[in-house]
Image (cartoon, grey):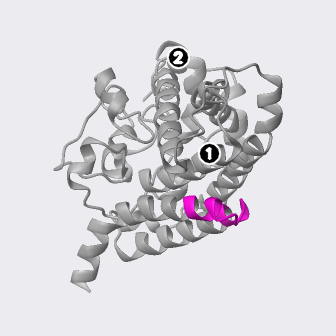
Amino acid sequence: MFVLRELIKVTYVPLMLGGFLAAALYALAGGYGYGALLVLLLLAIGISFALERLVPYERQWNQDRGDSWRDVLHAFVNEGANASSVALLPLIVAIVPGFDIWPTDWPMWGQLFLAILIADCGITLVHYASHIHPTLWRFHAVHHSVKRMYGFNGLMKHPLHQAIETLGGTCPLILMGIPLDIAALLAFAVAIQLLLQHSNVDVKIGPLRYILALSPLHRFHHIKWPVEGDVNFGLFTTIWDRMLGTAVYDAKRRFSSNDLGIGKEPNYPDTYLAQLIRPFKAPSKTEATVPNQAAE
């Protein structure tokens, strides 16, 4: 069992990310349709949850704190919105004038790689701005209110903030004329990456930490205090964080629930409807004067 656990720690990320993206590419190229992507996503979620229990980073993060159904609602609403966005893409492309410069002659995997890089830049910049601008932060704070990190945390977002991030990541792609299949693959890749980025699996990523924005790096982003937690904004890669000077990693640092949340708002609402309403309420003095992490 020890050998199996150590093997999982090393292979979890490449098999989840590489394996499921390869399967998604094969499914669409083979004409299996978008339903196959949903099946693959559900399988990825099941594997992620199973391995979080077999090889946990922090065992307590696997325990329900009355937040599981809330997180399921966030995931259902936000993934539903993502699917709707992809379905509406032909209408959006028809309405929005673009440049029709998308490299459709590239292989599908190359087009997906390009879409990931472009979307990663836009989403990272919106994410960075959300820790600086007080109004954006109030919507983004929903995501930072978590007290445990596990797979579903990545989809725990206020729907308006997710819409803003999505616009930041996809507007350049729409203007370039991204095809529907590549947009669907991108949405699938984002969902898989969010699973990995917030996973409670105790992974060993080695040199991948210099390239990919995975859970060992992203835990630093969820530190509840400002400055210390205003790091590692990237969704897919560390490229933009290195350019912004916000890339941080310390292999010796361990995290617990005491490190997570919003430092100056320990009683942030923890039910779904309350979290949807919270950003629209009048900000406290702290929120009005401290833009980054409410802070924190």
Quick one: SS at disc 2? loop
The 10 Å Cα crowd at callout 2, few under 14, some 14 to 19, many 20 or more, is some
Magenta residues? 25-37
> Camera-side residue: 137 or 66?
137
Q: Measured along the vertical axis of the image, is residue 42 above or below residue 271?
A: below
Residue pointed to by mark 1 = 182
Q: Quadrant of residue 170?
A: top right
Q: Amino acid at mark 2?
A: His
Q: Is residue 242 visible?
A: yes
Q: Is residue 278 left or right of residue 44?
A: right
Q: Amino acid at mark 1?
A: Ile
Q: Quadrant of residue 104?
A: top right
Q: Measured along the vertical axis of the image, is residue 10 above or below residue 247?
A: below
Residue pointed to by mark 2 = 133
Residue that appears at 57% across and 31% down = 169
Residue 270 in the magenta stretch? The answer is no
